[in-house]
Image (tube, rainbow, N blue to C red):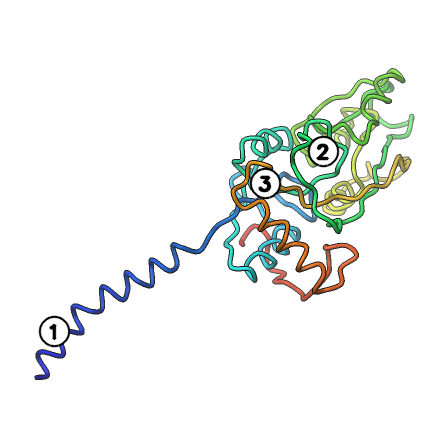
Amino acid sequence: MQRGLLLIFVLWLPLAVMADASVAAARPSLRMGIHNFPPDFVVSPDGKSCAGEGYLLAKKIFAQAGFDLTAICTTPARMYVLLEQGEVDFSINVKTTAAIGKVHQFIEPAYMAMQLMLYSHPLSSAAPQDKTVAAIRAFDYLGQRLQLIQQGYQLVDMPDSISAVQLFLHQRTQHLISYQGPFVAFAATQATDVMSGLKQKKLAEIDAYFLVSAASAHRQQIIEIVQLYAKTHSCIYLKGCGEHYSAQDPLQQ
């Protein structure tokens, strides 16, 4: 009798393991497009891993709704292509980017508020005394890109926010157009006297939102999940709203 029960257990165990694996495999997964925009979104130097505060918040929101979340590390220009193709389900962006198709949907409320700044080296610095401006490729900066060009400025495009900031701080351009968050986050890690004497001018304020690809198979679910989270926690902005999430090293998530 005991031998028969043992045989039944041995035969049942693999089936139970397979059933558990099947349940785990059935858990749906979403893909979030991330480019280097610290502190909210951070991409490793080799570009192979990415996360950040914004990713951790999104991961928590969608985990509560039964979704896994995968970070897709990319550049802004490439991310807009991936959104069009449905290769990423959502990202975070401002509403005015010309490269974003009108069929994609922004989710209210906003993720965070941002300030757009123009930083400049003093004329006494080693930076070129011209009208060069470090910028991010494919960003139109709320129309400020065109305005700067019309005023005779020469924009030097870089792949992401940090490479643009680095170009400027290395005194390769006279100016930098940047959202305040990435500049402050990166500058805080630099032990350099280049920071002293920098001039700054606020150009605009704008909100950034969760942006859902029109080609995502989970488009409506994403919208409803984010809106329900915001309603449940009475969020004015999603950033910092709701329960605290893990503050581990973002690139280890």
| Labelled disc at residue 7 | 1
In this rendering, the answer to whether 189 lies above or below 96 is below
**Is label 3 in a helix, a strand or a loop?**
strand
- Point 15% across, 73% down: residue: 8
| Labelled disc at residue 113 | none
Crowd class of label 3 (few under 14; some 14 to 19; many from 20; radius 10 Å): many
Contact (CB < 8 A) between labels 1 and 3?
no
- Point 63% across, 45% down: residue: 42
In this rendering, the answer to whether 114 lies above or below 173 is below
In the picture of the structure, the residue carrying the numbered disc 2 is: 166
In terms of image quadrants, where is residue 38? top right
Farthest residue in the bottom direction? 1
- In the image, 219: left or right of 12? right
- In the image, 244: left or right of 118? left
Contact (CB < 8 A) between labels 1 and 2?
no
| Labelled disc at residue 33 | 3
- Point 80% across, 30% down: residue: 176
Q: Nearer the viewer, residue 182 or 193?
A: 182
- Give how far across and how far down residue 158 sits, in percent: 68, 27
Q: Quadrant of the C terminus?
A: bottom right
The span from disc 2 to disc 3 (Cα, nearest Å) is 23 Å
In terms of image quadrants, where is residue 86? top right
The span from disc 1 to disc 2 (Cα, nearest Å) is 66 Å
Mark 2 or mark 3, which is nearer to you? 3
- In the image, 253: left or right of 132? left
Q: Nearer the viewer, residue 194 or 30?
A: 30
The span from disc 1 to disc 3 (Cα, nearest Å) is 49 Å
**Is label 2 in a helix, a strand or a loop?**
helix
Q: Nearer the viewer, residue 51 or 93?
A: 93
Q: Nearer the viewer, residue 78 or 38?
A: 78
Disc 3 residue type (three-letter) = Gly
